Amino acid sequence: MLLQFPTLNFGLILKDFVNKEPQTKCTSNNLRVYETGDGSISLVNTDLREVFHNSNGARKEAIEKFINPSEINLFKEQKEISVLDLCVGMGYNSACLVDAILKTQLSLDWWGLEQDKRPLQIALSSAKFRSTWKNKTLNFLECINEKNQWESNLGKGKMLWGDARLEITKIPKETKYDLIFHDAFSPQKSPELWSEEFLQKLSKKLSNGGKLITYSRAAAIRASLRRSGLTLQSLLTTKSSENNWSNGTVAIKSPNPHNKSTNTLLWSPLSQMEEDHLMTVAAIPYRDPTGNSSSFEIIERRNCEQKKSNLSNTNSWKKRWIRTKY
Ligand SMILES: C[S@@+](CC[C@H](N)C(=O)[O-])C[C@H]1O[C@@H](n2cnc3c(N)ncnc32)[C@H](O)[C@@H]1O
Protein backbone atom coordinates (compact mmCIF):
# COMPACT_ATOMS: atom_id res chain seq x y z
CA MET A 1 0.00 0.00 0.00
CA LEU A 2 0.82 3.67 -0.07
CA LEU A 3 3.16 3.70 -3.00
CA GLN A 4 0.68 5.67 -4.99
CA PHE A 5 2.88 8.63 -5.71
CA PRO A 6 4.09 7.99 -9.24
CA THR A 7 7.50 9.44 -8.42
CA LEU A 8 7.94 7.24 -5.37
CA ASN A 9 9.49 4.04 -6.59
CA PHE A 10 10.58 0.97 -4.74
CA GLY A 11 14.21 2.04 -4.93
CA LEU A 12 13.39 5.01 -2.75
CA ILE A 13 11.44 2.91 -0.33
CA LEU A 14 14.33 0.51 0.03
CA LYS A 15 16.70 3.42 0.56
CA ASP A 16 14.41 4.47 3.34
CA PHE A 17 14.70 1.04 4.92
CA VAL A 18 18.46 1.00 4.61
CA ASN A 19 18.65 4.14 6.74
CA LYS A 20 16.74 2.41 9.47
CA GLU A 21 18.61 -0.33 11.27
CA PRO A 22 18.11 -3.27 11.44
CA GLN A 23 16.96 -2.92 7.85
CA THR A 24 14.87 -5.80 6.63
CA LYS A 25 15.00 -9.31 7.95
CA CYS A 26 13.93 -12.23 5.80
CA THR A 27 11.18 -14.14 7.51
CA SER A 28 8.96 -16.04 5.16
CA ASN A 29 9.96 -16.19 1.50
CA ASN A 30 8.53 -13.02 0.04
CA LEU A 31 7.80 -11.27 3.36
CA ARG A 32 10.46 -9.21 5.11
CA VAL A 33 10.20 -7.50 8.47
CA TYR A 34 11.38 -3.94 8.94
CA GLU A 35 11.16 -1.43 11.74
CA THR A 36 9.17 1.73 11.10
CA GLY A 37 9.70 5.25 12.43
CA ASP A 38 7.52 4.84 15.52
CA GLY A 39 9.35 1.65 16.52
CA SER A 40 6.56 -0.68 15.38
CA ILE A 41 7.44 -3.45 12.96
CA SER A 42 5.98 -3.85 9.49
CA LEU A 43 6.45 -6.05 6.44
CA VAL A 44 7.50 -5.69 2.83
CA ASN A 45 6.12 -8.05 0.20
CA THR A 46 9.18 -8.39 -2.01
CA ASP A 47 7.30 -10.07 -4.90
CA LEU A 48 4.79 -7.26 -5.15
CA ARG A 49 7.34 -4.63 -4.05
CA GLU A 50 4.82 -3.25 -1.62
CA VAL A 51 5.11 -2.23 2.00
CA PHE A 52 2.36 -3.04 4.48
CA HIS A 53 2.70 0.38 6.12
CA ASN A 54 4.63 3.53 5.42
CA SER A 55 8.03 3.92 7.02
CA ASN A 56 6.82 6.67 9.42
CA GLY A 57 5.12 4.10 11.60
CA ALA A 58 2.84 1.10 11.21
CA ARG A 59 0.90 1.72 14.40
CA LYS A 60 0.87 5.46 13.82
CA GLU A 61 -0.61 4.91 10.39
CA ALA A 62 -3.35 2.63 11.76
CA ILE A 63 -4.33 5.32 14.25
CA GLU A 64 -4.13 8.29 11.89
CA LYS A 65 -5.74 6.71 8.84
CA PHE A 66 -8.24 4.28 10.32
CA ILE A 67 -8.94 4.78 14.03
CA ASN A 68 -9.16 8.59 14.27
CA PRO A 69 -11.49 8.86 11.22
CA SER A 70 -13.68 6.13 12.77
CA GLU A 71 -14.73 8.60 15.49
CA ILE A 72 -15.66 5.80 17.88
CA ASN A 73 -17.12 8.38 20.30
CA LEU A 74 -19.96 9.04 17.83
CA PHE A 75 -21.26 5.52 18.46
CA LYS A 76 -21.68 5.99 22.20
CA GLU A 77 -25.49 5.96 21.91
CA GLN A 78 -25.29 2.46 20.43
CA LYS A 79 -24.63 -0.69 22.46
CA GLU A 80 -22.64 -2.31 19.72
CA ILE A 81 -20.41 -1.30 16.84
CA SER A 82 -19.92 -3.58 13.85
CA VAL A 83 -16.66 -3.44 11.92
CA LEU A 84 -15.22 -5.20 8.88
CA ASP A 85 -11.42 -5.21 8.58
CA LEU A 86 -10.58 -5.89 4.93
CA CYS A 87 -6.98 -7.12 4.71
CA VAL A 88 -6.17 -7.79 8.34
CA GLY A 89 -2.48 -8.41 7.58
CA MET A 90 -0.51 -8.01 10.83
CA GLY A 91 -3.66 -6.85 12.59
CA TYR A 92 -2.67 -3.26 13.39
CA ASN A 93 -5.96 -1.62 12.38
CA SER A 94 -8.09 -4.03 14.39
CA ALA A 95 -5.73 -4.11 17.36
CA CYS A 96 -5.82 -0.30 17.54
CA LEU A 97 -9.61 -0.53 17.24
CA VAL A 98 -9.82 -2.97 20.18
CA ASP A 99 -7.57 -0.61 22.18
CA ALA A 100 -10.03 2.21 21.41
CA ILE A 101 -13.08 0.08 22.30
CA LEU A 102 -11.48 -0.71 25.66
CA LYS A 103 -11.96 2.94 26.59
CA THR A 104 -15.71 2.82 25.89
CA GLN A 105 -18.82 0.92 26.99
CA LEU A 106 -19.30 -0.34 23.43
CA SER A 107 -19.41 -3.98 22.44
CA LEU A 108 -17.59 -4.91 19.22
CA ASP A 109 -18.99 -7.14 16.47
CA TRP A 110 -15.86 -7.73 14.39
CA TRP A 111 -15.26 -9.46 11.05
CA GLY A 112 -11.92 -9.89 9.32
CA LEU A 113 -10.95 -10.82 5.76
CA GLU A 114 -7.42 -11.85 4.80
CA GLN A 115 -5.93 -14.41 2.44
CA ASP A 116 -2.47 -14.86 3.96
CA LYS A 117 -2.02 -16.19 7.50
CA ARG A 118 1.67 -15.37 7.64
CA PRO A 119 1.57 -11.60 8.42
CA LEU A 120 -0.36 -12.12 11.66
CA GLN A 121 1.76 -15.14 12.59
CA ILE A 122 4.97 -13.17 11.97
CA ALA A 123 3.63 -10.28 14.05
CA LEU A 124 2.61 -12.53 16.95
CA SER A 125 5.97 -14.27 16.95
CA SER A 126 7.70 -10.94 17.60
CA ALA A 127 8.22 -10.18 21.31
CA LYS A 128 8.47 -6.51 20.44
CA PHE A 129 5.08 -6.53 18.69
CA ARG A 130 3.43 -8.47 21.52
CA SER A 131 4.82 -6.17 24.21
CA THR A 132 3.08 -3.12 22.77
CA TRP A 133 -0.51 -4.37 23.22
CA LYS A 134 -2.74 -4.56 26.23
CA ASN A 135 -3.58 -8.13 27.35
CA LYS A 136 -7.13 -7.99 26.03
CA THR A 137 -5.95 -6.75 22.65
CA LEU A 138 -3.27 -9.43 22.43
CA ASN A 139 -5.89 -12.03 23.35
CA PHE A 140 -8.05 -10.78 20.46
CA LEU A 141 -5.15 -11.17 17.99
CA GLU A 142 -4.26 -14.62 19.34
CA CYS A 143 -7.85 -15.83 19.10
CA ILE A 144 -8.33 -14.77 15.51
CA ASN A 145 -4.97 -16.29 14.62
CA GLU A 146 -5.50 -19.62 16.39
CA LYS A 147 -9.26 -20.15 16.45
CA ASN A 148 -10.47 -17.88 13.62
CA GLN A 149 -12.89 -16.39 16.10
CA TRP A 150 -12.91 -14.34 19.27
CA GLU A 151 -15.28 -13.82 22.13
CA SER A 152 -14.76 -11.81 25.31
CA ASN A 153 -16.55 -9.25 27.46
CA LEU A 154 -15.55 -6.73 24.75
CA GLY A 155 -17.48 -8.46 21.99
CA LYS A 156 -17.15 -11.18 19.39
CA GLY A 157 -15.38 -11.65 16.09
CA LYS A 158 -15.00 -13.93 13.09
CA MET A 159 -11.97 -14.28 10.84
CA LEU A 160 -12.50 -15.44 7.25
CA TRP A 161 -9.29 -16.62 5.57
CA GLY A 162 -9.14 -16.66 1.76
CA ASP A 163 -9.69 -14.39 -1.23
CA ALA A 164 -11.87 -11.59 0.11
CA ARG A 165 -13.92 -11.62 -3.10
CA LEU A 166 -15.17 -15.08 -2.22
CA GLU A 167 -15.11 -14.87 1.57
CA ILE A 168 -17.30 -11.77 1.64
CA THR A 169 -20.14 -13.85 0.19
CA LYS A 170 -20.04 -15.98 3.38
CA ILE A 171 -21.01 -13.02 5.57
CA PRO A 172 -24.75 -13.17 6.34
CA LYS A 173 -26.79 -10.84 4.16
CA GLU A 174 -28.28 -9.06 7.16
CA THR A 175 -24.86 -8.21 8.64
CA LYS A 176 -24.17 -4.52 8.02
CA TYR A 177 -21.18 -2.53 9.18
CA ASP A 178 -20.75 0.81 10.91
CA LEU A 179 -17.14 0.81 9.73
CA ILE A 180 -15.24 -0.90 6.94
CA PHE A 181 -11.44 -0.55 6.94
CA HIS A 182 -10.17 -1.04 3.39
CA ASP A 183 -6.42 -1.61 3.65
CA ALA A 184 -5.51 -3.66 0.59
CA PHE A 185 -2.26 -3.27 -1.31
CA SER A 186 -2.38 -0.46 -3.87
CA PRO A 187 -4.87 -0.70 -6.76
CA GLN A 188 -2.08 -1.45 -9.24
CA LYS A 189 -1.02 -4.48 -7.16
CA SER A 190 -4.36 -5.75 -5.84
CA PRO A 191 -6.88 -4.37 -8.38
CA GLU A 192 -9.32 -7.19 -7.55
CA LEU A 193 -10.04 -5.57 -4.18
CA TRP A 194 -10.56 -2.13 -5.73
CA SER A 195 -12.83 -3.08 -8.62
CA GLU A 196 -16.07 -1.18 -9.15
CA GLU A 197 -17.96 -4.45 -8.52
CA PHE A 198 -16.18 -5.28 -5.27
CA LEU A 199 -16.45 -1.72 -3.95
CA GLN A 200 -20.16 -1.86 -4.72
CA LYS A 201 -20.45 -5.04 -2.66
CA LEU A 202 -18.66 -3.36 0.24
CA SER A 203 -20.91 -0.30 -0.02
CA LYS A 204 -23.97 -2.53 0.26
CA LYS A 205 -22.55 -3.95 3.51
CA LEU A 206 -22.54 -0.51 5.16
CA SER A 207 -25.36 0.46 7.50
CA ASN A 208 -26.90 3.90 7.09
CA GLY A 209 -24.36 6.43 8.33
CA GLY A 210 -21.65 3.75 8.06
CA LYS A 211 -18.18 4.67 6.80
CA LEU A 212 -15.74 2.95 4.49
CA ILE A 213 -12.28 4.24 5.36
CA THR A 214 -9.24 3.79 3.16
CA TYR A 215 -5.78 5.27 2.76
CA SER A 216 -6.41 5.45 -1.01
CA ARG A 217 -7.04 8.80 -2.64
CA ALA A 218 -6.94 7.34 -6.15
CA ALA A 219 -9.43 8.86 -8.58
CA ALA A 220 -10.62 5.44 -9.82
CA ILE A 221 -11.46 4.33 -6.29
CA ARG A 222 -13.20 7.55 -5.36
CA ALA A 223 -15.24 7.55 -8.57
CA SER A 224 -16.36 3.95 -7.97
CA LEU A 225 -17.29 4.69 -4.36
CA ARG A 226 -19.30 7.72 -5.45
CA ARG A 227 -21.12 5.69 -8.09
CA SER A 228 -21.93 3.20 -5.33
CA GLY A 229 -23.93 5.99 -3.71
CA LEU A 230 -21.46 6.98 -0.98
CA THR A 231 -20.62 10.55 -0.01
CA LEU A 232 -16.91 11.23 -0.34
CA GLN A 233 -14.70 13.04 2.12
CA SER A 234 -10.98 13.57 1.81
CA LEU A 235 -8.88 12.59 4.80
CA LEU A 236 -6.73 15.59 5.62
CA THR A 237 -2.98 15.28 5.81
CA THR A 238 -1.17 15.55 9.11
CA LYS A 239 2.10 17.37 9.75
CA SER A 240 4.05 14.14 9.63
CA SER A 241 2.18 12.49 6.79
CA GLU A 242 3.97 11.39 3.67
CA ASN A 243 1.23 12.78 1.44
CA ASN A 244 0.82 16.39 0.47
CA TRP A 245 -2.81 16.59 -0.57
CA SER A 246 -4.83 13.82 1.01
CA ASN A 247 -4.30 10.98 3.45
CA GLY A 248 -7.12 8.92 2.02
CA THR A 249 -10.87 8.71 1.66
CA VAL A 250 -13.81 8.41 4.02
CA ALA A 251 -16.91 7.29 2.07
CA ILE A 252 -20.16 7.58 4.01
CA LYS A 253 -23.49 5.90 3.34
CA SER A 254 -26.52 8.21 3.72
CA PRO A 255 -24.77 10.55 6.17
CA ASN A 256 -27.07 11.39 9.06
CA PRO A 257 -27.27 15.21 9.31
CA HIS A 258 -27.87 14.93 13.08
CA ASN A 259 -24.84 12.75 13.64
CA LYS A 260 -22.35 15.57 13.37
CA SER A 261 -18.70 14.75 13.13
CA THR A 262 -16.99 15.94 16.29
CA ASN A 263 -13.74 16.58 14.57
CA THR A 264 -14.05 18.34 11.27
CA LEU A 265 -10.30 18.78 11.27
CA LEU A 266 -10.03 15.17 10.18
CA TRP A 267 -11.59 15.43 6.76
CA SER A 268 -13.30 17.78 4.34
CA PRO A 269 -15.34 17.50 1.14
CA LEU A 270 -13.18 16.96 -1.94
CA SER A 271 -11.35 20.12 -3.01
CA GLN A 272 -11.71 21.46 -6.55
CA MET A 273 -8.39 19.82 -7.36
CA GLU A 274 -9.68 16.45 -6.16
CA GLU A 275 -12.97 16.86 -8.02
CA ASP A 276 -11.03 17.67 -11.21
CA HIS A 277 -8.97 14.52 -10.65
CA LEU A 278 -12.21 12.53 -11.03
CA MET A 279 -12.69 14.03 -14.50
CA THR A 280 -9.44 12.56 -15.82
CA VAL A 281 -8.57 9.11 -17.20
CA ALA A 282 -7.23 8.22 -13.75
CA ALA A 283 -10.86 7.92 -12.70
CA ILE A 284 -11.55 5.01 -15.07
CA PRO A 285 -12.47 2.17 -12.72
CA TYR A 286 -10.93 -1.24 -12.25
CA ARG A 287 -13.46 -3.76 -13.55
CA ASP A 288 -13.93 -7.37 -12.49
CA PRO A 289 -17.38 -8.32 -13.82
CA THR A 290 -17.08 -12.03 -13.03
CA GLY A 291 -15.46 -11.53 -9.64
CA ASN A 292 -12.60 -13.88 -10.47
CA SER A 293 -10.40 -12.03 -12.98
CA SER A 294 -6.67 -12.05 -12.34
CA SER A 295 -4.89 -8.82 -11.40
CA PHE A 296 -3.30 -8.81 -14.83
CA GLU A 297 -6.65 -9.08 -16.61
CA ILE A 298 -8.15 -6.27 -14.54
CA ILE A 299 -5.22 -3.96 -15.20
CA GLU A 300 -5.23 -4.78 -18.94
CA ARG A 301 -8.98 -4.15 -19.15
CA ARG A 302 -8.52 -0.76 -17.54
CA ASN A 303 -5.54 0.15 -19.75
CA CYS A 304 -7.66 -0.57 -22.85
CA GLU A 305 -10.53 1.52 -21.54
CA GLN A 306 -8.17 4.38 -20.71
CA LYS A 307 -6.69 4.34 -24.22
CA LYS A 308 -10.14 4.68 -25.76
CA SER A 309 -11.35 7.29 -23.28
CA ASN A 310 -12.11 10.94 -24.12
CA LEU A 311 -11.49 12.00 -20.54
CA SER A 312 -8.73 14.52 -19.98
CA ASN A 313 -5.16 13.45 -19.43
CA THR A 314 -4.06 13.10 -15.81
CA ASN A 315 -0.69 14.74 -16.53
CA SER A 316 -2.47 17.93 -17.60
CA TRP A 317 -4.38 17.80 -14.33
CA LYS A 318 -1.09 17.52 -12.44
CA LYS A 319 0.42 20.43 -14.36
CA ARG A 320 -2.66 22.56 -13.75
CA TRP A 321 -2.54 22.06 -10.02
CA ILE A 322 1.19 21.94 -9.49
CA ARG A 323 2.62 24.50 -7.09
CA THR A 324 -0.84 25.48 -5.91
CA LYS A 325 -1.70 25.34 -2.26
CA TYR A 326 -4.41 22.76 -1.99
C1 LIG B 1 -1.36 -3.51 3.09
S1 LIG B 1 -1.49 -5.12 3.69
C2 LIG B 1 -2.60 -4.96 5.04
C3 LIG B 1 -1.98 -4.33 6.25
C4 LIG B 1 -2.79 -4.61 7.49
N1 LIG B 1 -4.01 -3.85 7.56
C5 LIG B 1 -1.95 -4.44 8.74
O1 LIG B 1 -2.30 -3.64 9.61
O2 LIG B 1 -0.94 -5.12 8.85
C6 LIG B 1 -2.51 -5.89 2.49
C7 LIG B 1 -2.98 -7.28 2.86
O3 LIG B 1 -3.91 -7.71 1.86
C8 LIG B 1 -3.84 -9.11 1.78
N2 LIG B 1 -4.49 -9.53 0.52
C9 LIG B 1 -4.02 -9.37 -0.74
N3 LIG B 1 -4.90 -9.82 -1.64
C10 LIG B 1 -5.98 -10.30 -0.94
C11 LIG B 1 -7.21 -10.90 -1.31
N4 LIG B 1 -7.53 -11.09 -2.58
N5 LIG B 1 -8.07 -11.24 -0.33
C12 LIG B 1 -7.75 -11.04 0.98
N6 LIG B 1 -6.59 -10.47 1.38
C13 LIG B 1 -5.71 -10.10 0.44
C14 LIG B 1 -2.36 -9.39 1.87
O4 LIG B 1 -2.11 -10.72 2.27
C15 LIG B 1 -1.91 -8.35 2.90
O5 LIG B 1 -1.87 -8.92 4.18
Image (spheres, helix red, strand yellow):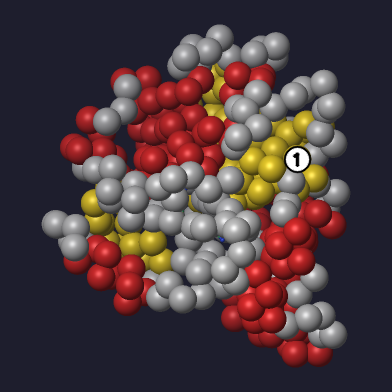
Residue 205: x %, y % from top left = 75, 41
90 displayed left or right of 171: left
Q: What residue lies at 60% left-to-right and 37% top-to-bottom? A: 266
In front: 179, or 289?
Answer: 179
Q: Is residue 225 above or below residue 61?
A: below
Residue that mark 1 sits on:
252
Residue 122: x %, y % from top left = 28, 49
Element carrying mark 1: strand
87 displayed left or right of 122: right
In front: 55, or 168?
Answer: 55
Q: Quadrant of residue 194?
A: bottom right
Outermost residue toward the front? 324
Residue 81 seen from this side = no
Q: What residue lies at 84% left-to-right and 27% top-to-bottom? A: 257
- Give the amino acid type for the residue marked by disc 1 in the picture: Ile
Image quarter (top left, top right, bottom left or bottom right) of the C terminus = bottom right
